[in-house]
Amino acid sequence: MNQDWHEENYRDLMCVGLRVQRWLYRGQSEFQRIDIFDSEIFGRVLSLDGVLNTSEADEAFYHEQLVHPAMVSAKHAKRVLVIGGGDGGSVREVLRHSSVESLVMVEIDGEVIDACKLHLRSIGSAWDDARLQLVIGDGAAYVARDDLDPFDVILLDGTDPEGPGEVLYSAEFYANCRARLAEGGVFALQSASPFIQRDVFFRIQQRLRAAFSTVHPYFGPAPLYCSGVWSWTHASEGQDPLEVNLARLAAIEADCFYYNRQIHRAAFVQPNFVRKGLAALPTG
Ligand code: SAM
């Protein structure tokens, strides 16, 4: 890699380059390559295996959209599970909800957390919250356990479907997440770019539909990610994502950088190419 640039090469078809002002962390963990650097446009950036994962400048677009739609539409929001999320941004957003009594975070790579605690404190600002229980381990193995108390909300903040994150895109993993949900619970995940990763996006939709009766993708910008057009998906047994607990929403709305009640509704509006793609998905 050119020392002055971080280049994310997407399938050898597209490259996103960021000029590096300063490298802060460069390491190879048991699971992946970890790089943290300063950039002019996005501020401090985390890259894993050469893929841009989060940045100080745009992380709120992503973390607020991953966390709040599920937290305000689940029946309860007391027991929460975050899978992945090593930068701490999802945890920070979950713990803004005073309804949360316990939050379990299962991250496979402790070195990512350590590096982010050292160099990305602006994103992971809730590591010391007493409600947080940190588990270093594989999220897929964790949700396969049947001795866990059910969760009101499960959030998947994982990497792309390669390397350690691949297992987090399987039908079995989604079925286990379904089994770990409490009545009225919601599972939400980042579901790739519906534009540049169309195959991944529709495969996720199809597998989620096999595990959950109610599946709603939603959309928004993610400036750091390839194409900038991103999706998340809300999955449950009958929870309507537009039926929100207004008190829970109002309690966090004003302090959000991106998310609010109008954005919440607009995000679930499906563009035509998505509607047609979903209608064409094989059933059963
Ligand atoms: N928002 C980012 C994205 O969409 O690319 C993800 C950010 S977060 C840093 C992703 C985290 O998922 C990483 O810290 C990675 O180590 C973790 N991860 C990957 N596979 C995992 C697994 N099987 N179980 C738990 N955590 C995993």
Image (spheres, helix red, strand yellow):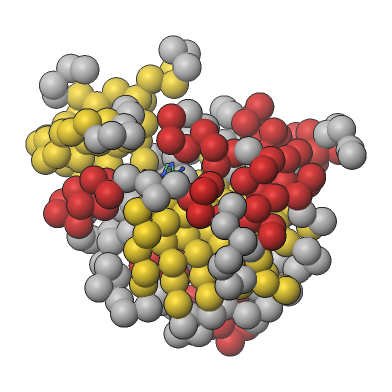
Residue 132 position within the rendered picture, expressed as x and y whole percent measured from the top left? 36, 72
Residue plotted at (65% across, 53% down): 176
Residue plotted at (13% across, 21% down): 3
Q: Is residue 208 left or right of residue 194?
A: right
Residue 86 position within the rendered picture, expressed as x and y whole percent measured from the top left? 34, 52
Q: Is residue 104 left or right of residue 124?
A: right
Residue plotted at (58% across, 66% down): 147
In what quadrant of the picture does the C terminus appear? Answer: top right
- In the rendered image, the residue lying farthest to the top is 12
In the displayed structure, 280 sits above or below 257; it is above
- In the rendered image, the residue lying farthest to the front is 147
Residue 218 visible in the current orientation: no
Residue 24 position within the rendered picture, expressed as x and y whole percent measured from the top left? 11, 40
In the displayed structure, 105 sits above or below 272; it is below
- In the rendered image, the residue lying farthest to the right is 284
Viewer-nearest residue: 189 or 229:
189
- Ligand 1 picture quarter: top left
